[in-house]
Image (spheres, rainbow, N blue to C red):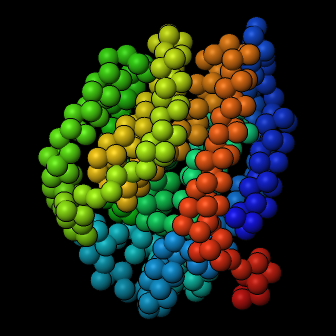
Amino acid sequence: MHKLIPIILGSLFLALLSYSQSAYVLDEEGKRFYIKKEKFFFLIMALSMAVFVGLRTSGNDTTVYRNMYESIGNDIHNVADINWRNLSAAPGLQLYSFFLKSIGATVQDYLMITAFITVGIYLWFIRKYTDNIFLSIFYFITMGAYTFTMAAIKQTMAVAFLLIATDAAIQKKWIRYLFWLVIAELFHPYAFIYLVVPLVTFRPWSKGTRYLLVGAVIAAVFMSRVLTIVDTVTESLGYTNYGMNEFMGAGVNIFRVMVAWVPLILSFLGRRELQFTDNREKNIIVNLMMINSVIMFIGLFGTANYFARLANYFLIFQTIAFPYILKLFRREIGNILTIMSIAAFSLYYYYGEGIVNGGFDMNYNFMTLFEYFGQR
């Protein structure tokens, strides 16, 4: 895990500087509320995190994407060969790759530019909506959202565009919301799940939340029927890579499910405060955070490969909602819960990246920034 430590410590230090240099006011309980968020240190942090992702040369499915890009011809007329009806072929990613290849971008440029798009949009969204810059960046790292940007380019780019769509939905700009939803769909068909965004404006732990949780239990009990529906929908969208049998297998690790449910449980304990808020932005973000937890729960009865990745579509909302939920408690209790969460998520992250499957360092390799520019 020593390859990750420098970027993690550096990013957290810059996030702390951004947090401390932001303008804020204190309420009667001493809780911070932003007036203006700091930009300079945050931008340096965002650039550093994106560059680190873009410098990778192997790890997870990076080699698959490298080979795919290298196999593309230099002729932009390859665009005519794109099958826009087969979403499983990710026509949006094909067009994006053809464009980069036509302007002479190397395979490492491809990874670097993609990293700037995905990590940049993720961090832009976090900065815009978080109540605590430092904590959200800490959770972004330790919940695994940052590491996931080093894999699954189709999905991570789709999620990035979906965050832009969500931002539009929060502002009730529906044409822009639908535009970015369609763009995301061209990168990964599961993007259609964000059609739920306009429906989750209700107050957390109101009737809407109860329906959501009851629906999760029903989905878990009738898993085979749910998977049949999922298979039918994705196949109708042109996603033919997986059949229903592919969804059946070992479920999501219960430890991961427990971690995903921590913010949900705390939001239940602070539900009275949540039910009195009429903040559309907060309602949407907390409810989307709950969807992440619900999908992870359903994944106990399905297969980790698909449900864990499906849950990752909403993981970013965990990193934003958690600091907000911690503010629902009295300052003393909130501080204790914050310290406990930092300790627990640090151990969780170390377990996931330092121990499981030999750890992060076993599979991931990177070039230095000097080597990257040397290739130019």
Q: Residue at x 24, y 57 (%)?
A: 248
Image coordinates of residue 194 in percent, x first then y, are 36, 44
Residue at the (81%, 41%) spot, across then down = 16
Relative to residue 334, is residue 162 drawn left or right? left
In this view of the protein, can residue 111 be seen by the observer?
no
Point out residue 314 in the picture as x, y percentages from the top left corner: 45, 44
Is residue 309 positioned above or below 269 on the image?
Answer: below
- Give the camera-side residue of 20 and 309: 309
Image point 50% across, 54% down: which residue?
Answer: 160
Left or right relative to 353: residue 93: left
Q: Quadrant of residue 238?
A: bottom left
Residue 84, placed above or below residue 354: below
Circle count: 0
User: 101 or 363: which is nearer to us?
Assistant: 363
- Left of 20 or right of it: where is 210? left
Determine which quarter of the picture holds residue 83.
bottom left
Where residue 270 sits in the image (x, y, percent)?
Answer: 54, 16
Query: Quadrant of the image for the N terminus?
Result: bottom right
> Looking at the picture, does residue 193 appear above or below residue 56?
above
Query: Residue 189: percent from the left, percent from the top?
Result: 31, 59
Quadrant location of the C terminus?
Answer: bottom right
